[in-house]
Image: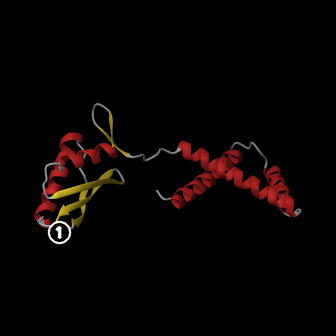
Amino acid sequence: MQLWGKVVLGVVGILLLLFAVGVGVFFFNVVSLLALQEWMVNFYTLLHMNLLTRALSVVGIVLLVAGAVALLRFLLPRGGRFLTYRTEEGEIRVSFDSLEALAREALRGFQEIVSVTPRVEKMGREACMVLHLVVRTDAAIPELSNLVQTKVRERIERQTGIVLKNVRLLVDLKAQETV
């Protein structure tokens, strides 16, 4: 999730939390409506005082919001760099690093491939493998790409039980050195 998505999620979380607290306060009649109105008037008059008081009020509000966002960050589950799936025996987590290492291992014997850089992308509860391949100029890319996608998909599924949504390839040709 991008930074702005996290900020929006934090602000929405804070607003929902405040709304829930407000409903609870009114439902259980913890604070009277008159006292709440008095607090709002005091807050309004605080913001209409001199410039220093306004600045301190804004700093206080920013600190309050930042604290609430930090609290929500610790409370919300993190996506992490792993995939989680459940079996009858329990929960299994497989790290992206392990999946990337398996992809490299699956492609180790290919003579046409000079180097491979795998990257796992999480799409909801599924994974997509992106392989950046540098291949020799004499490689037949269509046949090689089908073989690479099949090998990587089968290796990861056989060893981890994870079915990849798709395997995407980014192919670069290595320039031949002149003799």
Whether residue 46 can be seen here: no
| Residue occupying image coordinates x 42% and y 46% | 80
The image quarter in which residue 167 lies: bottom left
| Residue occupying image coordinates x 36% and y 53% | 124
Identify which amino acid the numbered label 1 is placed on: Thr
Image quadrant holding the C terminus, namely: bottom left
SS for dot 1: loop
In front of the other: 164 or 42? 164
Whether residue 89 can be seen here: yes
The percent position of residue 172, horizontal first and vertical second, equals 24, 66
Category of crowding for the residue at label 1, using alpha-carbon neighbours closer than 10 angstroms: few (below 14), some (14–19), many (at least 20): few
In front of the other: 74 or 22? 74
Determine the residue located farthest toward the top in the rendered image.
89
Residue assigned mark 1 = 178
- Describe the colour scheme in one phrase: secondary structure
The percent position of residue 73, horizontal first and vertical second, equals 55, 47
The percent position of residue 157, horizontal first and vertical second, equals 20, 45
Above/below status of 122 relative to 173: above
Q: Is residue 146 left or right of residue 163?
A: left
In front of the other: 129 or 20? 129
Determine the residue located farthest toward the front in the rendered image.
179
